[in-house]
Image (tube, rainbow, N blue to C red):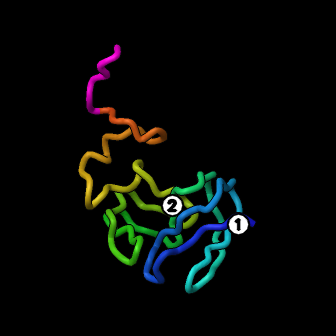
Amino acid sequence: MNLAFRIHPHDNVATLLQDAPVGPILINGESPCEIVLIEPILAGHKTAIVPIPAGGSVIKYGCPIGYATSAIAPGAWVHLHNLASNYDVRSSTLDLHSGSPTDTVNAYV
């Protein structure tokens, strides 16, 4: 079974330890649980453990790291397309998959 870890017991997201397809995943940590991924998620990325409403805090490390820009279902990928950072306003302008800036002109065009 694929694995993810919850850093703090109050976290509402977990981080994938390996690439995982749609299906069950074990979340380990202080309170292990199992959820079902509703989309494939790459290693190092986050999934919601519980429903996170639009505007709700995304909690990792026991602290809010940002807020949901739309409702996020358990097992959904939590990333730039549905999370606004509390620490980096520019993160909402980055390319979803590469993390490259999209708000600047490429000097090599």
Between circles 2 and 1, the one closer to the viewer is 2
Q: Residue furthest bottom?
A: 30
Magenta span of residues:
103-109
Quadrant location of the N terminus in the rendered image: bottom right
Q: Nearer the viewer, residue 51 or 81?
A: 81
Residue at 63% across / 79% down in the picture?
Answer: 33
Type of amino acid at the residue the image marks with label 1: Pro
The residue at which mark 1 appears reads as 24
Q: Which of 75 and 2 is in front in this view?
A: 2
Label 2 secondary element:
strand
Residue at 51% across / 73% down in the picture?
Answer: 50
State which quadrant residue 34 falls in: bottom right
Q: Which of 84 and 108 is in front in this view?
A: 108
Badge number at residue 46: 2
For residue 53, side relative to residue 24 (left or right): left
Badge 2 crowding class, 10 Å Cα cut-off, few under 14, some 14 to 19, many 20 or more, is many
Label 1 secondary element:
strand
Residue 104 lies in the magenta-colored region: yes
First in sequence: mark 2 or mark 1?
Answer: 1
Position of 52 relative to 70 (above/below): below
Badge 1 crowding class, 10 Å Cα cut-off, few under 14, some 14 to 19, many 20 or more, is some
Q: Which residue lies furthest to the top in this view?
A: 109
Type of amino acid at the residue the image marks with label 2: Lys
Residue at 44% across / 53% down in the picture?
Answer: 79
Counting from the top left corner in percent of width and height, residue 64 is at: 33, 71
User: Rounded to the nearest whole Å, what is the CA distance between mark 2 and mark 1?
Assistant: 15 Å
State which quadrant residue 27 falls in: bottom right
For residue 25, side relative to residue 80 (left or right): right
Q: Residue furthest front?
A: 108
Dominant secondary structure, magenta:
loop
